Amino acid sequence: MGAAGAERLREVEPPAWDELLDELGCRDAYFRRGFFDAACLVEPGAATLLHLEGDGGHVVFACIVRDVPAGQGARDVVTPYGYGGPLALGADPPVARFHELYEEWCAAEGVVTTFVRFHPLHENWRYAAPRARLERLANTASWPLGADADLLGGMHAKHRREIRRGVEAGLETVVRSAPEELGDFVALYEETMRRRDADAFYFFSAAYWDALAAGLRERLLVVDGRFEGELVASALFLATPPWLHYHLGAMRDPGGSLGATKVVLYEAARWAREQGYAELHLGSGLGGREDSLWRFKQRFSPSAGREFWIGKLVHDEARYRGLAGAAPADGYFPAYRAAAALEARR
C-alpha cells in the first residue's frame, strides 16, 4: 500500500476483526474478537480494533473504549484483563505514525487516558508511545517447551516430588481440546474462589463463560485432574500456537495433598510440546506482584520468565485533573476510577 494508506487509522468492523488478524499472522487469543466479547463483560465498554497500514508493515491495537462516569462525554481506553497493547507487525511497521494518529483519534473521540497491560511474549512495551509512563512489574512465569527441555527435571524439586506422588497415588488427567462445554470447570472454579474468599472481580458471570466458549472454543484447552473419578483440579488455557496461555485454575480436596494442580499443569506442558507449542505462558501473580502465586508458577521452569510492563498515558491533562482532582501519579490509574475499582472487588 502506498504512503497515503499510512495516513489513515481505521476502526475495523467486528466481522472483519479476526479476518484481519489472520491476514497479518496474529493468532494470539488475547487479541481475538471472541476474547474481547467476553472481556467486555468484565470491563464494560466497546471492543475496538484500530489498524494502521504502512509501506513496510502494520500496527494494530485491540482495546476497550469506556465511558467515564460523570465525565460529560469523556472516555478512556484500557486493555482487557490479561495481556495486550499495540502490535507492530511486518518488516517496518509505522509505529511513530501510529502514535501520532492515535493521539488525533483520542482527541476526536474524547479519550482522556489509555492504560495498557503489555504482552510479555510479544514484548510490545518496546513500542509504547514516547509520552507513556512505563512501569515494570514482576516477570511473568514462562515455561519453554523445546524438544530438548527436561520438563520434569527442570522444575523445582518440591514440584517434581508432588507430581510424582500424585501420579503414584492414582491421580488421572484428561485433556480436552476445544471443549464442548465448560460447566464442570466453572463449577469447580467458583467453588475455589468462594473457598479462597476471592474478590468479587474474580467471580465471572454466566454470560462471560458463554461468550468465552462461543468466541474461542477452538482456541480453548481444559486439563482435568481426577482422583477416584472425582474432579479435584482443572485448568483452562488459551491455545494459540506457538504459545499456550494459562488462563484460570481451580482445585478442591483432596487435590491439594495430591499436588493435583501441579500434575495438571505438567500434563498441559507435555500435551503442548507434543502439539508443537514453543512455550507455556503461566502468567504473573495477583496484580503483577511477586506473591505466593507468582512463586508457585516460577517453580515450574528454570527460565527467568518474561518482562511484564504496564503503560499509563494521559491525552488530555486538563480534563484528567478535572476528573481526578490531581495530576497523574503513582498508584491506581486512572485515579478517577480508583474508588469504583475498589468497590467492584469487594
Image (cartoon, grey):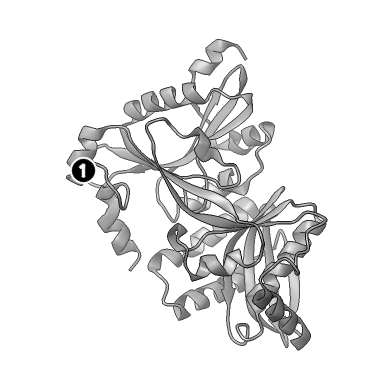
Label 1, secondary structure: give it. Answer: helix
The image position of residue 292, as x and y in percent, is 50, 71
Tell me what residue is drawn at x 59 percent, y 42 percent: 122
Residue 203 position (above or below residue 58): below
Residue 85 position (above or below residue 193): above
Residue 251 appears in which quarter of the rendering? bottom right
Tell me what residue is drawn at x 54 percent, y 22 percent: 94
Left or right of 205 in this view: 269: right
Left or right of 69 in this view: 62: right
Tell me what residue is drawn at x 47 percent, y 63 percent: 290
The image position of residue 64, as x and y in percent, is 44, 43
Left or right of 281 in this view: 173: right
Left or right of 167 in this view: 334: left
On the question of residue 72 being in view, the answer is no
Q: Crowding at label 1, few (<14), some or many (≥20) Cα neighbours within 10 Å?
A: many
262 vs 220, nearest the viewer? 262
How many labels were placed on the picture?
1
Tell me what residue is drawn at x 75 percent, y 56 percent: 145
The image position of residue 215, as x and y in percent, is 60, 51
204 vs 84, nearest the viewer? 84
Looking at the rendered structure, the kind of residue marked 1 is Leu
The image position of residue 131, as x and y in percent, is 37, 32
Quarter of the image for the N terminus: give it.
top right
Quarter of the image for the C terminus: give it.
bottom left
On the question of residue 67 being in view, the answer is yes
79 vs 145, nearest the viewer? 145
96 vs 303, nearest the viewer? 303
Residue 194 appears in which quarter of the rendering? bottom left
Residue ID for mark 1: 323
Residue 274 position (above or below residue 130): below
